[in-house]
Each structure stands twice: as structure tokens, then as C-alpha cells.
Image: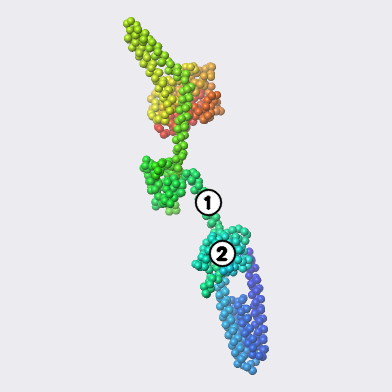
Amino acid sequence: MRTEQNQVEYAATQPTIVRSRALAAIGAAVAIVVFILDTITAKEIALAVLYVGVVLLSAKFLQKRGVVLASLGLMALTGLSYMLSEHDVSPGIALSNGLLTLAAIGITAFLAVQSRSREMVLREQAGLLDLTHDTVFVRDMNDVISYWNRGAEELYGWKRGEAVGKITHQLMRTTFPMPLEQIMAKLLRNGRWEGELVHTKKDGTQATVASRWSVQRDGRGRPVAIMETNNDITERKQAENALRLSEAYLAEAQRLSLTGSFSWKSSGGEFFWSEESSRILGYDRTTKPSLQLLIQRVHPADIDRVRRVIDRASREGKDWELEHRFQMPDDSVKFVKVVARAVADESGKVEFVGAIMDVSAAKQAEQELRQAQADLVHITRVTTLGELTASIAHEVNQPIAAVATNAAAGLGWLEAEPPDLDKVRATLGYIVQDAERAGDVMHRIRALAKKAPLRLARVDVNEAVLEVIALTRSELVRHGVSLQTQLATGLPLIEGDRIQLQQVILNLILNAVEAMSSIDKGTREVRITSEREASNAVLVTVRDFGPGLDPRSVDRLFEAFYTTKPSGLGMGLAICRSIIQAHGGRLWATGNEPRGAVFQFTLPLERGKTVPAEHAGA
């Protein structure tokens, strides 16, 4: 059973078979008629020369061998006709006519065979052109199409019969990369031309092709035809355009995000960086990238650390990242973060692909944020001290009043007769003690109110707690609150900012006092304890017996601007948590039994170590 393709090919060959059979019948009929006439005609007329027409006709439907056999057959008919005819009147003329006929048949057969051979060669060449997927067509110097291969049919949609005889560039509405006159001038000058064209297909869609033109000349060198071959590159051009667009988007994204890319083959030293990387590094786009040029930009204070990381990455072939600074030619400094990933190629060699991010703006914003946080911490601390004005005044007035009383007594002892110098000396001692007591109070107030950057030092947590308690003693008495302490002995020193840690303790004590000022019955007591945690940290606990915490809002206590006080700003506990977190610790709150609240915070003994959440209660 024939396949669909075979059926199509079979149907296409039917007209050719029918035509060949018709021509064969005509040729046979002509040959028979010529033979009969040549045999019966009395006059010596070279009717057999008409056999030449039969030879030419046979060349239309027979192969070379068939033409030769047909010619031999016609020669045989010529000889037979000569033998059957009577030549009494002029036998010489009859012989001459016979020889002339044989020569004409032979020459015609030879020429027909040669023509058939050339035609077969051309057909084979045309068949080969039909096998290629490229489009091939030939046009004369007026751009009229004379040949159209199957590839052209498949690409453009016009069949050979529809295209042959049409003007090329009108049929396909060609878009040229330059004026056609310039293309033709170059074609005639060089014999060839190559370029990209845009053709419109039969269905109206467009195809971009890589086109090659070659001029064909006659024996005198005159141009007679142009052969054009086209390769459809539409998909490739679309991919190239998409790639260019993607690269443009990537370059713009890198420019907006201040992130450049790079690649480095440590084995061969090959280095590449993107346009944004060259901008970050401060090099011209035409500068050939190299690792040495990158290292030249590294800040002198960071160069050793950067070299160590790069050398280790080169040896081990592992991912790496680091933050450092670039010192630019104008002495400005850029903060950058470099991230690189190790990728193995087919040969197993390692290539690092990475990104360079300019984080200068982020670093500046981070510094400004830290400064703003420090200012806010200071403002909150001063505000807290303002709330303690009455207590502070009481704390200061007590030693001042004692100084005045002792001074008056001393004057009295001096005016006595005789002056009692021993009592005067004792009184002056009391005055010194009271003055030192007032000075201590002012010193603590001045230290808490002072605006200063974070200063890390070895801090005795118990001592810091006792200093704050001394400052709040009058406030506790004024609200009828007792304060109990249970401070562990032998606590190791922690590294931190003493003033900021005291701000946390002060805020937690005042919150506890305020919470209990509203209760009429029960114990008004604040308990402060300190102990060493198993997680290598110091734990400080402030416990009160006030109304307690609302379970629905306990998770929001440390949010900025969240407050349960009618006149509160909601910043105290938020700042306290940020201070503790800056020290590597944690601050959290839980309910107290049978009532009240418990606030606890941890401080790690080693700077830079964070207390695990499971040990911090967070």
C-alpha cells in the first residue's frame, strides 16, 4: 500500500507519463508515414530527411540510449526503403539522397544526445538544488525570476509556476540594508554580494534571511543572470534580539542595584567583569579586566585580608565572600560586598562566578541609623530622668540640707567659749560626707544624661544595678514600693556600655514602680536578681507584683510606639530590647505568680557571642 507521500509523487508523475506516451505514438506514426512515402515515391526526393523530426521528437521523451536506438531504427528504415524502391532512372541521385538522409539522422541524433546529456546534467543540478533547505532562485538582469527551487517554495509559499516570470523584489517586497543601486554596483564590481534581507512571504509574514548573490556572465563577460541563495535566520535574529534585550535589561538592573558581575578562572588567570563592575571599580570600559587591577583598588587597610581570602579560594576552589573597601583614585572610599561561587567546567577546572555590590549607601544609612538610634536612646534616657525630677531633687536636697545643718552647728561650736574644736572637726567631716553624697548623685545623673557614643568596657553588672537603685531610692519611697535584691556573688565582668545597660535597668524599675502605684492592696515590692546562666551569660531579672500583663498584648510589648500607658510614647521597652540585642543578649517578659510581671535579660560573657533563644526565654 502506498503511503501518502508516495501517492502524491505518483500523482505528480502521471501527466509526464501520459505526455511521453503521446509523443511516442506521434513519433511512430510520423516514421511510418515517412517510410511509406519514401518507398512508393518514384521521384528521387530526399523524403527520408523528415526522419530528423522524429529524432528530435524522440529526444523529448527518451533517454540518451533510447534516442540512439531510435536513430538506428530510422537509419534501418531508410536503408530498407532504398532497397524496396526502384532507382532505374537516377540510381546515383537515390544513393546520394540515402547517404544524405543517414548523415542527417546521425548528426541530429548526436546533437540530440549531447543536448539530452546537458539537459540531464542541468536537471541533476536542479534536483540537487531542490534537495537543499536553502532557497535558490535565478533572475535575469531585470530581476525577472527564471528558476525557483523547492526550498524557495517551502520558505516563501509560492510554487514554482507562481514565482517564475515575476519580478523578485516586487513579489517578496524586499527590505534592503542599503539602496539597491549600491548593492548592484558592488555585485557587478566584485561578482558577489552578501548581506541580510527581509522578505515578505505569501502569507504576509516576514522572514529575515542571510542572502548571497553571484552574477553569471556570458562568453563576452556580459552579466546575464543573478543567482541568489537565502538562508532563513529569522529565529536566530529573534534570539539575538532577545539576547541583546536581556543583556540591556541585565545591565540596567545592575546599574540600578549597583551590582556588577565578574568571572575568574583561577587556573589560567582569565578575568572578566561587567560594565557596572568597571564603573564600581572606577576603570574605563575599554580597560582589559584583570584580578591585579581589582586588587589595586582594595583599601590598604583591607589588602592583606582580601589577598588571604583570594589565595585560599584559589587553592581550595570553594565559594567565598567578604566585605571590604575600595580606595578610589580621588581618595574616596567605597564599601563593597563580594560574593563568588565556584563552578566546575567540563574539564573539571574551577571558575568563580560572582557579584560586586556597592554597599556604600547602605553603610552610610546604617551609620546614620545607628546615630539616630543613639540619639533616640539618649532622648529617652533624658526623658526618664525628667520623670525622676522630684526624686532626684529629694536625693540632692537631703545631703545639701544636712550640709547646711552641720555647717550651722559647726559655727555654733566655734562661737562657744571656749570653742569646741573636736565637735567642729566631727561636724566638718559630716559636711564632707554629705557633699560627696550629693556629688555622687550629680555624677550619676550627669553620666546618664550625657550624650556619648557607644563605649565598650568591662562592666560589673551588680555594681551597675546598685548605682541605679541608689538613684531611684526616693522614687521607691514616694510610691511606697520596697525593693529587694538577690545579686549573685562572683559574677564575671561582661563587655558592654555601662550607661546604656543602666538605662535598661532604670527603665524596668520605673515601669515596675508605675505598675504597682495603681494597686491599693497587697505587696508593693520590686525584686531584682542576677545570676550566671548555663549558656555562659549573665541573667538579670526584675520582678514586680502589679496587675500583670495582658496575654493578648504580651507579644507586642517591645514593638516601637506600642504602649498601654495613657501618656506613653511606646519607645521605652523597644529601646531597651535594641540595647540588649546590640550587646548580643535578649530581653523578654512573662507573667509573675500569683500576680505581676517578670522582665528578664541576658548578657553574654564573650563579646560577639549571641545567647541562644532556648536559654533566653525568647
- First reached walking from the N terminus: tag 2 or tag 1: 2
Q: Kindly tell me whether residue 339 is visible in this rendering.
A: no
Instruction: Name the residue located 65 percent from the left edge and 79 percent from the top edge.
Output: 27
Query: Which amino acid type is shown beneath numbered disc 1?
Result: Leu
Q: Kindly tell me whether residue 381 is visible in this rendering.
A: yes
Give the spatial CA distance, label 2 vs label 1: 30 Å
Residue 181 in the image, given as x and y percentages of width and height: 54, 64
Specify whether 419 is left or right of 200.
left
427 is higher (above) or lower (below) than 455: above
Query: Which amino acid type is shown beneath numbered disc 2?
Result: Thr
Q: Nearer the viewer, residue 361 or 69?
A: 361
**Occupied quadrant, residue 63:** bottom right
Q: Secondary structure at mark 1?
A: helix
In the picture, the quarter occupied by the N terminus is bottom right
Residue 413 in the image, given as x and y percentages of width and height: 35, 8
Total numbered labels: 2
**Occupied quadrant, residue 121:** bottom right
Instruction: Name the residue located 47 percent from the left edge and 44 percent from the top edge.
Output: 258
| Residue that label 2 marks | 135
375 is higher (above) or lower (below) than 90: above
Are the residues at dot 2 and dot 1 in contact (C-beta closer than 8 Å)? no
Specify whether 580 is left or right of 426.
right
| Residue that label 1 marks | 245
Q: Secondary structure at mark 2?
A: strand
Residue 223 in the image, given as x and y percentages of width and height: 54, 71
